[in-house]
Image (cartoon, rainbow, N blue to C red):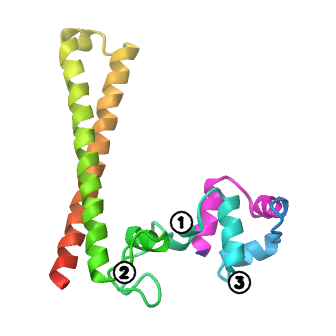
Amino acid sequence: MSDAITHYRQLRELTVDELAYVLRMLDHPISADVLAEMERCARPVTVDDLVAIAYALDTTPAVLLSHIPIDMPEPEGPLATGLPSDVDQTELRAWIEGKTTLDRKSRVSWWEERAGRLRVRSAHHEEQLQGAYAELRELGDLAVQEADAPPVQRLQWRIQDGEHALNQSEVALALTEHRLDNLREDA
């Protein structure tokens, strides 16, 4: 959690002193020195501190609790003591938020629902992308001749963003289906 506090504080472009000031204004004073100790894992974070810090950083306690540093190597065991070793960050956050339990049946159900949502999202992105391609085709030679024109550039950006969003959705869906297959095999 210490990395999460640092990450979200920096994301909000706050210094430790500024976060301490915000917490003082929220009637939950934590000195800058104590915050720095929390960020270095030299001091534990109480539940009250967690709630106040999450609020001050415009996030939730669940996000701070389930934060995994982007450069963290794949853990060899569970993300937290007592959890099944195959629970990932997404599922951990869902469990913390009360959206699933960690028994096998609930986990399979949660991953099935997630896969369904991702299929809908992918279909939506595909539909939007096909619409943008159709608009570009309708422009025909004009799109080539007026490639620098703002409407053509916006359309090309829409296509680029759509391709990226579709790719992201398809990768997330593939990973989700893989996780679901693994859970079903272990049952």
Q: Which residue is situated farthest in the bottom direction here?
A: 82
Q: Is 7 placed above or below 187 here? A: above
- Which residue is under mark 2? 102
| Residue 153 placement: quadrant | top left
Question: In the rendered structure, which amino acid carries the disc numbered 1?
Answer: Val
The magenta-colored residue range is 2-23
Badge 3 element: loop
Magenta stretch contains residue 6: yes
Instruction: Name the residue located 38 percent from the left edge and 71 percent from the top edge.
Output: 91
Separation of marks 3 and 2 at Cα, in angstroms: 29 Å
- Disc 2, disc 1: CB below 8 Å? no
Question: In the rendered structure, which amino acid carries the disc numbered 2?
Answer: Leu
Separation of marks 2 and 1 at Cα, in angstroms: 18 Å
Separation of marks 3 and 1 at Cα, in angstroms: 20 Å
Percent position of residue 98, x then y: 46, 71
- Which residue is under mark 1? 63
| Residue 31 placement: quadrant | bottom right
Question: On residue 43, which mark appears?
Answer: 3
Instruction: Name the residue located 58 percent from the left edge and 71 percent from the top edge.
Output: 3
**Lower position in the chain sequence, tag 3 or tag 1:** 3
